[in-house]
Image (cartoon, rainbow, N blue to C red):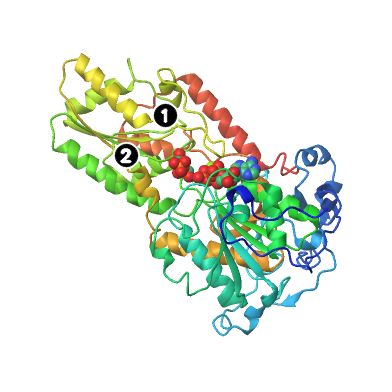
């Protein structure tokens, strides 16, 4: 049965995309994803001199793999496990390969070993103990000697989804320039307005010229959105337009969306590489060292904290309260506090706090005002949500299903004001909410470089035929990570970690933690460590 037209009539733009080409490839029936577990020995990238075998064949792994049917695990010697990403040849076995055009590129000709050795992998766990688990490895990113797409065959598209983040435009620019400069690709489409743009909006042509200075602007030139992920319509659109490389720049939700697009593409047997570039200002994506834009956000947050400090220091019993982004993970607040040194108290979602009584926030504020005359509080937007919910009705969900948060900054301002009024103490509280101003800035210099490297790494991966993967920096090296690894849990500030202790010791704030909180936090850390150690992803551990 012919699939429906790519544009949703109800949401369509006046200018529809091209109709289905008559020579569009017929869908190919492929075996189920589980069957691909047997395609573990990549003919091109099989590490040399290693006794490789599918982990599936080893004892005690069936249960672990049943939990992760999409896992593509390959075992080596001495407990080595490669957690590999899919490849188009897994389901289209007889594809031709081509020499990488980079070999004739004068700019790269001087690089000593330009192509990545097929044996190279990056270990997830960098600190190991004698006799302990080694953790899994990921395939190292970078250009391969042979590629699966000819330059003029490539028809790439880029989409940005979810909330804004500094660096989005830099990643777009560098995917376009990377494809063009390194691989001679000329057909690159921008999908407008997030996932729904595949079927409800026009596309725009992206060229090195059209993206030349976009990295100097905040936001995304393509637009973004929440919700609207309709897998069938998206893949229909990909198929009709003849797109064969899909680059998804987005957070955990977007990467989940990319994962289901990849599954549908594979089911239809299309030669299409689906690749993700993780984006999250909250830094809540696990496995990777940090997300692009995070440093820029922390830097920009300093301006708000400085302002709060100046205001607080210039008034009698001045309190500067700054709200920063961080829905479930308080990394921006944590790092902005550590960087500033002007903050007396940092509140994050991971560390519950309370207001009244011994060890509570009010006692601490009273003490700081008495000792110092003023103070600065930084609060992540997701902090104290349970406390607030005791007084206010929950706000529901956004179009992507994310919980809408109650405004902790306003609530806290009101509570602090009420408390001191009751105690007949004059205070001057100034509440600053710079959240969207921070999110909307262009990326700083170091994020620009980071975005460039991520973009080039993802392009190399797609050109080499890898698919169903996210690019990421792990322990300082770029690698290809299966989608499920970065969506199975969220990265959170560990309050039993030395980094949070550093913050507590620099602010001198109370920890607000009961024995039970600490026990729960430790258990959570253990669960995270187990995930890192392997089970169920690494049955060897
Ligand atoms: N489980 C899922 N399956 C398919 N699509 C999804 C899924 N979760 C989210 N999406 C889609 O991904 C897009 C972005 O999701 P979301 O709004 O949660 O932002 P995000 O990518 O997590 O970024 P951030 O939270 O950092 O702003 C939306 O279009 C949403 O419909
Ligand atoms: O207002 P929006 O676009 O839903 O975004 C708000 C959310 O997006 C984030 O910036 C994540 O992208 C969160 O920190 C924040 O809660
Ligand atoms: Mg998200």
The residue under label 1 is 406
Residue sitting nearer the eye, 250 or 297: 250
In this view of the protein, can residue 286 be seen by the observer? no
Element at label 1: loop
Where is residue 435? Give x, y as percent.
36, 43
Residue at 65% across, 39% down? 531
The residue under label 2 is 433
Residues at marks 1 and 2, CA–CA distance in whole angstroms: 14 Å
User: Left of 533 or right of it: where is 504?
Assistant: left
Residue at 50% across, 59% down? 222
Where is residue 19? Give x, y as percent.
70, 63
Element at label 2: loop
Where is residue 281? Give x, y as percent.
46, 47
**Quarter of the image with the C terminus in it:** top right
What is the number of the mark on residue 324? none
In this view of the protein, can residue 87 be seen by the observer? yes
Residue at 16% across, 16% down? 424
Q: Earlier in the sequence, mark 1 or mark 2?
A: 1
Relative to 77, residue 62 above or below: above
Residue 489 occupies which quadrant of the picture? Answer: top right
């Amino acid at each position: 049965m012919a699939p429906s037209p790519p544009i949703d009539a109800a949401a369509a733009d006046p200018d529809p995309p091209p109709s289905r080409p008559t020579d569009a490839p017929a869908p190919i029936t492929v075996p189920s994803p589980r069957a691909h577990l047997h395609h573990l020995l990549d003919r091109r990238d099989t590490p040399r001199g290693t006794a490789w075998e599918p982990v599936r064949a080893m004892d005690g792994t069936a249960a672990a793999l049943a939990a992760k049917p999409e896992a593509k695990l390959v075992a080596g010697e001495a407990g080595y496990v490669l957690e590999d990403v899919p490849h188009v040849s897994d389901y289209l076995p007889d594809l031709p390969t081509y020499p990488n055009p980079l070999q004739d590129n004068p700019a790269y000709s001087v690089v000593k070993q330009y192509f990545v050795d097929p044996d190279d992998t990056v270990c997830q766990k960098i600190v190991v103990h004698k006799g302990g688990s080694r953790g899994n490895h990921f395939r190292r990113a970078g250009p391969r000697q042979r590629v699966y797409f000819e330059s003029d065959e490539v028809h790439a598209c880029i989409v940005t989804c979810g909330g804004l983040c500094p660096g989005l435009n830099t990643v777009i620019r560098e995917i376009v320039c990377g494809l063009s400069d390194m691989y001679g690709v000329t057909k690159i489409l921008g999908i407008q307005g997030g996932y729904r743009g595949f079927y409800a909006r026009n596309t725009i042509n992206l060229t090195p010229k059209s993206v030349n200075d976009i990295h100097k602007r905040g936001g995304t030139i393509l637009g973004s959105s929440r919700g609207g992920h309709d897998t069938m319509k998206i893949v229909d659109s990909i198929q009709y337009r003849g797109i064969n490389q899909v680059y998804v720049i987005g957070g955990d939700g977007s990467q989940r969306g990319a994962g289901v697009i990849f599954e549908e593409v594979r089911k239809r047997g299309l030669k299409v590489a689906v690749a993700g570039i993780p984006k999250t200002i909250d830094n809540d994506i696990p496995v990777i060292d940090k997300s692009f834009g995070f440093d820029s956000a922390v830097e920009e947050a300093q301006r708000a904290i400085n302002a709060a400090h100046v205001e607080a220091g210039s008034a009698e019993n001045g309190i500067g309260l700054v709200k920063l982004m961080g829905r479930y993970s308080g990394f921006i607040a944590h790092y902005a506090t550590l960087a500033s040194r002007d903050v007396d108290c940092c509140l994050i979602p991971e560390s519950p706090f309370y207001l009244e009584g011994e060890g509570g926030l009010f006692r601490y504020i009273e003490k700081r005002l008495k000792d110092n005359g003023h103070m600065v509080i930084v609060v992540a937007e997701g902090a104290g949500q349970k406390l607030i919910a005791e007084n206010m009705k929950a706000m529901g969900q956004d179009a992507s299903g994310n919980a809408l948060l109650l405004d902790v900054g306003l609530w806290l301002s009101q509570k602090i004001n009420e408390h001191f009024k009751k105690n007949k103490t004059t205070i001057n509280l100034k509440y600053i909410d710079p959240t969207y101003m921070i999110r909307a800035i262009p990326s700083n210099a170091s994020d620009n470089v980071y975005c460039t490297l991520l973009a080039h790494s993802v392009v190399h991966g797609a050109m080499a035929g890898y698919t169903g993967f996210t690019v990421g920096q792990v322990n300082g090296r770029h690698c290809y990570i299966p989608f499920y690894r970065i969506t199975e849990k969220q990265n959170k500030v560990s309050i039993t970690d030395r980094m949070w202790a550093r913050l507590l010791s620099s602010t001198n704030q109370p920890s607000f933690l009961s024995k039970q909180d600490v026990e729960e936090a430790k258990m959570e850390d253990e669960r995270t460590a187990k995930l890192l150690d392997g089970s169920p992803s690494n049955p060897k551990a």
